[in-house]
Image: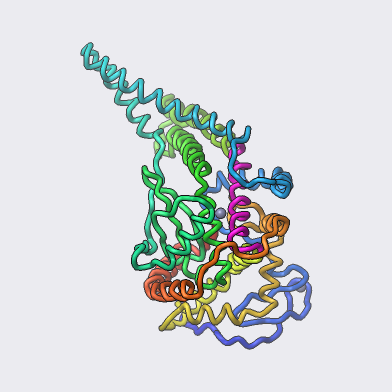
Amino acid sequence: MLTQEIPGNTSESVEICPACGSQVPRHANFRSWCECGWNLEPFESMTSDTRFAAVYHKLGRKLGTKLLLDMMNEKSFKPRLTTNKFIVFLFASLIHLITVSLAVSCCVLIVNGIHSHYYFYVLLGAIAALAVWFSAPRFPKLSLDGVRLSREQYSALYGLVDEISDYMKLPRIDGLIIDHRFNASYLQAGWRMKRYVTLGLPLFSILSREEKVALVGHEIAHGVNRDILSGFYTLSAYHTLLRWSDLLDPQDSGITERNLAYFVSKHVLKLLSYVPWLLANLFIYLQFYESQKREYLADYKAAEVGGTDAAIGVGEKLYGWRTFATALHRYVMNRQTGNFFESYKEMINAMPDRERERIRRVELLEGSRLHFTHPPGAYRLQFLRHHFHAGSSVSVTDEHWAKLEEELKELEPRIQTKMIVDFQDDLVHTTDFQVYT
Ligand SMILES: [Zn+2]
Ligand SMILES: [Zn+2]
């Protein structure tokens, strides 16, 4: 760990751009950049699912512009059955049908085997049972590393989310979680597919009132009923394909003997594993259009409830994650004590126009997107401006906002502790930051 003090003053000086030699302003808290493009790289948060990401990038280059045009001309943002959705549904049904057939064969084999005392059938049935266990869809689990809020104690935060759900005519959420990430997300988990919204305090606490409404609106919009039902039905089929592919592709066992059995297990199974793998890729092709459309739909809803300016504001703040990263890095490395959120918010409030300009430029760069599943930042901006909404449609009283800010303040110490522990772990393992909403 570094012991040298990281400078925290805000005084400005100049430095020389290493690319073109111009003088550029230097600021202790923010990244230097130059008109020539130095330090203006496209931003995209890292991802571990590279197989998925690579196909998405390729499709994005091919279909991204057409999708944007479709979304600009879209009149109704109500979910409806499209040919594309129907094909995805049929494809997923086919995969699930294989699992169901395996389950039926397993029962028939075991019952027949026991009745006829022909135990080889029972053995085959047991193998089929294993295959069923391997193929069966898994309900998403809620991995809780934030604070799950109680409705009684945090009535103002729940009140805001409920207000927005009611406006969108969606069922109220089952749980609100506040965590330490610069992020927000929506998840349906468990066999009852309960609805959860997670809001990262570092992001949520720097948003204006309208931006808070827009962010919650975006996440809630991911819960449009049919969207998520088809999402689970189809996504679980995709995961089944990936598991089949992994099962068939044996890892290097370290056996040095080169006999026929080894050849068969290593090469024939590997070849077979390409079948589900190719099918999984075909699935991504089919799914791509719908999943990107969902992001546009969520953005549309965010602008409807919070206003277009607020929806754009949330995007800009997300692209400005670096300020949070710098504040946290400095807080931990300088072994500062006291409330992290206060020094962090001070830094945000003192952000120079030049840094805002850098963020805007990065957002517009080709290849900038918050996550590989999302449309490019520039496209989202174009889309939001095209379907303009003048202001917020959800009215919340000043007393409600004051209570909500109190609730957030009360959560700060707990979130701060978790954030610092996580940062120290990340220092050991990785420096990646994940941002997606
Ligand atoms: Zn330059
Ligand atoms: Zn989203």
Q: Residue at x 32, y 28 (%)?
A: 129
In front of the other: 28 or 382: 382
Quadrant, the N terminus: bottom left
Q: Please name the colour scheme applied to the rendered image.
A: rainbow
Identify whether 230 is placed above or below 433.
above
Q: Residue at x 62, y 59 (%)?
A: 303
Residue 292 part of the magenta segment: yes
Provide the residue span drawn in magenta: 285-308
Q: Is residue 134 left or right of residue 241?
A: left
Identify whether 289 is placed above or below 419.
above
Q: How many marks?
A: 0
Percent position (x, y) of residue 155? 39, 66
Q: Is residue 108 visible?
A: yes
In front of the other: 180 or 29: 180
Q: Main secondary structure of the magenta part?
A: helix
Q: Is residue 321 left or right of residue 104?
A: right
User: Which picture quadrant has residue 90?
Assistant: top right
Percent position (x, y) of residue 137? 41, 37
Q: Residue at x 47, y 37 (%)?
A: 233
Q: Is residue 153 left or right of residue 85?
A: left
Specify the quarter for ligand 1: bottom right
Percent position (x, y) of residue 16? 73, 79
Residue 343 part of the magenta segment: no
Identify whether 147 is placed above or below 93.
below
In front of the other: 232 or 33: 232
